[in-house]
Amino acid sequence: MKLLIGLDGSEASRHALTEAQKRARMLNAELHILTSVAPNENRNGTRQNFVAHLDEAKMLCNACGIECHTVLADHELTPAEELLAYAKDKNIDEIIIGIKRRSQLGKMIFGSTARQVIIEAGCPVLTVK
């Protein structure tokens, strides 16, 4: 079994990572961790921060005996599109994504990565607050 989590460094994604680790241990699954970064995003060391989050997540997984693959995606796609494309390409069985509380207006203006993943994913999606 293959699990995919989108990690963006937020509190919500850290909670999702904890849940993903529990599920990976319980199901003896391999865990894929994806972080999406705009190709030219390097202001204030943002890219390095994302790499550090991925490295830390991989270390935590390895310490628990979980097979883990990390990916820093830097294509021209949105984070939701990156997750969906990766899930399809790697035949992911379940996507785990952290969600943040946002008003309806906020979702309409900015969109929602989680909402797009839930609607378009070809596999089950677990959301974690």
Image (spheres, rainbow, N blue to C red):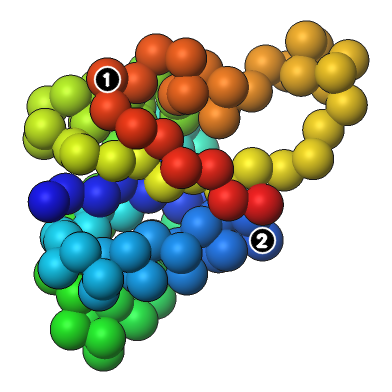
Q: Is residue 119 visible?
A: yes
Q: Amino acid at mark 1?
A: Gly
In percent of the image, x 12 and y 51: which residue is there?
Answer: 1
Question: How packed is label 2: few (under 14 Cα within 10 Å), some, or many (20 or more)?
Answer: some
SS state under label 1: loop
Pointer 2 residue: 11
In percent of the image, x 14 and y 68: which residue is there?
Answer: 28
Q: Which numbered dot is residue 102?
A: none
In the image, taking residue 111 as reference, residue 117 lies left or right, namely: left
Q: Which numbered dot is residue 122?
A: 1
Q: Quadrant of residue 38?
A: top left
SS state under label 2: helix
Q: Is residue 128 above or below residue 106?
A: below
Contact between marks 2 and 1 (CB within 8 A): the answer is no
Q: As rendered, which of 123 and 56 lies closer to the eye?
A: 123
Q: Nearer the viewer, mark 2 or mark 1?
A: 1
Question: Where does the image place residue 7, in percent across and percent down from the top left?
Answer: 46, 51
Question: Where does the image place residue 12, in percent across and percent down from the top left?
Answer: 64, 55
Q: As rendered, which of 20 and 26 lies closer to the eye?
A: 26
- The residue lying furthest to the bottom in this view is 63
Q: Is residue 49 visible?
A: no
In percent of the image, x 85 and y 18: which residue is there?
Answer: 104
In percent of the image, x 42 and y 46: which residue is there?
Answer: 96
Q: Is residue 98 above or below residue 93?
A: below
State which tag comes first along the sequence, 2 or 1: 2
In the image, taking residue 35 as reference, residue 88 lies left or right, namely: left
Q: Amino acid at mark 2?
A: Glu
- The residue lying furthest to the front in this view is 26
In the image, taking residue 29 as reference, residue 12 lies left or right, namely: right
Q: As rendered, which of 27 and 11 lies closer to the eye?
A: 27
